[in-house]
Amino acid sequence: MALRLVTRLTPEQVGDLMRLFEDTYWASERSRDDVERMLSSSSFLFGVVDSGTDRLLAFARVLTDGVFRAVIFDVVVDPGRRGEGLARMLFDAIISHPILGEVEYLVLYCKEDVVGLYERFGFTEDCQGMRLMLRKRT
C-alpha cells in the first residue's frame, strides 16, 4: 500500500481524524465543531493517508511563532497500523520542514507510556530547568 503525506485534510479525512480521536484517552470527547476550529487555527497540519483510499491513518499538528518555539500536538496513529513507521513519517516531515526545522525549540508533552517513542526522534526529558504548567478551563 502506498502512503502519502498531506498538509490539509478533506472533510472525509476530518471524519477519519474524529475516529482516530475516539480511540484515544485524551481526545475521545472532542466534538467535530471544536476539531474543525482547532484545525483552522493550527500553524501546520501533517497527515499520513493511504493513497488508494485517501483514508487518514496518522496525524499531528504544530503551533509555532516560526522562530523560537513550536509545539507538537495531537499525535495519533490508527491503532491497527501502529508499528508501520507512520509516526516516523510524521516526525520526519515536521523536523525537516523548512520553517519548523529552524525553530529554536521543538516541544511536545506526553504521557509516560510514549516517552520512548519520542526519544527515537531526538526528544529528551531534559527540559533545561523549564517546567510545564497547566491551567484547565473551569
Image (spheres, helix red, strand yellow):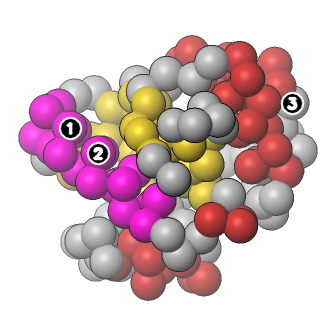
Q: Residue 52 at what x, y percent from top left? A: 57, 37
Name the residue carrying label 2. Answer: 93
Mark 3 vs mark 1: give the one in front.
1
Asked which quadrant contains residue 111, the reply is bottom right
Q: Does residue 101 show up magenta in the picture?
A: yes
Q: Is residue 86 magenta?
A: yes
Name the mark on residue 31: 3
Q: Which residue lies at the image location 81% right of the left edge and 19% below the top edge? A: 33
Question: Mark 3 is on which residue type?
Answer: Ser
Tag 1: residue type?
Answer: His
Q: Main secondary structure of the magenta part?
A: helix
Q: Are marks 3 and 1 in contact (CB under 8 Å)?
A: no
Among numbered discs 3 and 1, the one appearing first in the sequence:
3
Q: Are marks 1 and 2 in contact (CB under 8 Å)?
A: yes
What residue would you read off at disc 1?
97
Instruction: Read off the magenta span.
Output: 85-102
Q: Mark 2 belongs to which amino acid?
A: Ala
Q: CA distance from mark 2 to mark 3?
A: 27 Å
Residue 4 in sight = yes
Check disc 3 and report its element: helix, strand or loop: loop
SS assignment at label 2: helix
Q: How many marks?
A: 3
The percent position of residue 56, horizontal first and vertical second, equals 62, 40
Residue 109 in the image: above or below residue 116: above
Q: Is residue 122 above or below residue 25?
A: below
Q: Residue at x 49, y 21 (%)?
A: 8
| Residue density around tag 3, few if under 14, some if 14–19, many if 20 or more, within 10 Å | few
Height in image: 63 above or below 134?
A: above
